[in-house]
Amino acid sequence: MATHPPDDIAIIGWHVSPMIRRTELTEAQMLLEVVNGATAHAGITNADVDFTCAGSCDYVAGQAFSFVQNIDAFGAWPPKRDSHVEMDGAWALYEAWVRLLVGDLDVALVTGSGRSSTADPDIVYPMEMDPYYLAPLGVDAMSFAALQARVLLDGGVVTERQMAEIAARCRRDARANPHAQVAGDFDVDALLAEDYVREPLRRHDLPPITDGACAVVIARADKARELCENPVWIRGLSHCAEIHYAGLRDLRQAESITRAAKAAGVGDAPVEVAELQTAFTHEEPLVAAALGLGADVVVNPSGGPLAANPIMATGLVRIAEAARQIRDEGRHRTLAHSTSGPCLQQNLVCVLEGE
Amino acid sequence: MTTTRSVEATIRFPYKRSLGPVMGAFMTALTEQRFLGIRSGERVLCPPREWDPDTAADLSADDLVEVGPAGTVESWTWVSSPSAAHPLDHPFAFALIRLDGADTALLHAVDVASPDALSTGMRVAPRWKAERVGHITDVEAFVPGEVPQGGGGAGAEEPVTMMDYDAAITYTTPVTRNEMRAEAANAEGRFLGLECPACARVYLGGRGFCPIDALELGPEHEVELSQRGTITNYTIIEPVQYPGQTETEPFARVHVLLDGSDVILGYQPVVEFPVGDVRIGARVAAVWNDTKVASGGGIELDGWIPTGEPDDTDPNLVNRIC
Ligand SMILES: [Zn+2]
């Protein structure tokens, strides 16, 4: 085994909930399952967890400080250091990683959870946009994505056929993913014959609406070794944001992805698999290019967000899937990407390695 | 765990926002049927921002310049079934529109009959509302062509400094089986408890799990809770006559620790317990009424009445808040 400096931090366990259109569980109940699943996977108990950090959204939950109730699922006694981000759980993992780098705590539990069926996502999403110029127009996630898709189509970055091929590939790959909500064999010509939902986007270009949650356990090097035979090492982790208002950006580019990738060291060695939070088909070639991924990189073997898109957990699921590729599929170096905000505004890149 | 019921609630978000010198000037100009952009280095940004997006340098209201009113569509999407939050109630387009003289695009609606009328590069002009208040929706939508439509009347007499944003979201939340069983027990005049198999703490029925052990609780963990308890804390409320307030005299709300459990019922009303006598340590018992039973309803808790037992003098009672 290679030796790791004490500040190296590894993923030692994770759990992904069922991904369904409408769960009968509360958000805290969804979390209970993934928290206990992830700690069991890591071979620890709640008592071993020094720090918890959750990613969720009050506007999605329909309750102010909903994360305070969600803490009930963490077994937070004796009291634990806890934090929360109103972002995808991938950013909760980023905070937990930074927290463990301080050096005084060894084990952190990270969650992402979203119950999209609680309200209409097209009504919830605008609440989180620029309150002066965008929210009063009710601009929803699908419309933002469609505006960027047309820019990429007009710019020759992608074609509608390529977009349909991406959807067909993701749905085909998703057949092997027990957590997938949308999976199966689809004919590209048949997909292209369907009507637009938000021209130029058809149904297959869009993610499903998903209720789901994910939990990941990370630990500092010495503790990871003690608890786990095959830790998945976080080799690089960074995030970067650009201006919120999409009309002020060049939508053919995703500079924040490129910067985060550089900071995370994506180019330092070949990446075998990339799990990307590309919830819309046209985003995949843009994100892959911005990350500098070669054509040989396997993208979203889980089916990605087009197979299941649990808002506030989709990015953390990418990290869990990228870790799974190393632990269960024998890969050595994988990448996970998460995004937040309209038209890929903010992006997180996580590079993982096996021993 | 399955449910058979959900509750629906609509939450309104009626925000008032201050606009500051740059956006305030932009919104004021809208009332005058004009668009403002702002110089930022070599570029003119519209909508105007308060800082340079590349350098974060402050931008000054002195650098505002008039742009538009017509512009060019840089991207568009067709919204065939508008949401309640959208600006138009019939199918329309969202578009990124670069107004003449600006280097960036404004996102707004374009009102045409069908997507066949749309193309990248098409020319559009605003259709102004007749009554403008200094709000992004003072532009009802953009329409094809070079000539602004609608509008009329005068601009704002005073600079616009504030804007309203009034949103509403309807939420549908599941009622868990535990919550339904607890409600059913209440309707029979009982308090249901749930005892954690790991730590033996007893929680009020309805809770899904022990938060200490992160263990799921269900019907097999149910216990009957006492109808008696001790006041651990209280507050006396001087009623403010807001709409819906039925109290006119000062009244008490008490926290009750139920005997033989860790359960505290918060913010409970009291019965035949003068406000001046309410105190920590007082022994109380539940009072139920069955007035709704005849009409098919359940038994309801009226509140808590003093039992006359000696007070509990444990000084730590007040530390129990939940
Ligand atoms: Zn317990």
Image: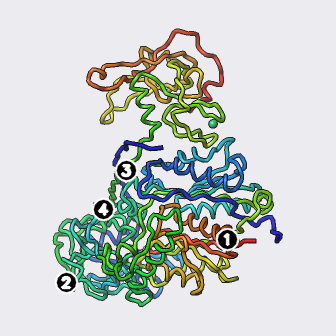
Q: Nearer the viewer, mark 1 or mark 3?
A: 1
Relative to A134, residue A31 above or below: above
Name the kind of residue labelled 3 in the image.
Answer: Tyr
Residue named by callout 3: B171
Q: On the rendered image, what quadrant is the C terminus of chain A found in?
A: bottom right
Indicate if the residue with disc 4 has its beta carbon within 8 Å of ligand 1. no
Quick check: marks 2 and 1 in contact, CB under 8 Å? no
Q: Quadrant of ligand 1?
A: top right
Dot 3: element: strand
Q: Nearer the viewer, mark 4 or mark 1?
A: 1
Quick check: marks 3 and 4 in contact, CB under 8 Å? no
Name the kind of residue labelled 2 in the image.
Answer: Val
| N-term mark: 3 or 4 | 4
The x, y position of residue B187, in whole percent, is 39, 26
Q: Residues at marks 2 and 3, common chain?
A: yes
Residue named by callout 4: B85
Residue named by callout 1: A326
Name the kind of residue labelled 4 in the image.
Answer: Ala
Relative to A191, residue B100 above or below: below
**The quarter of the displayed image where residue A219 is located:** bottom right
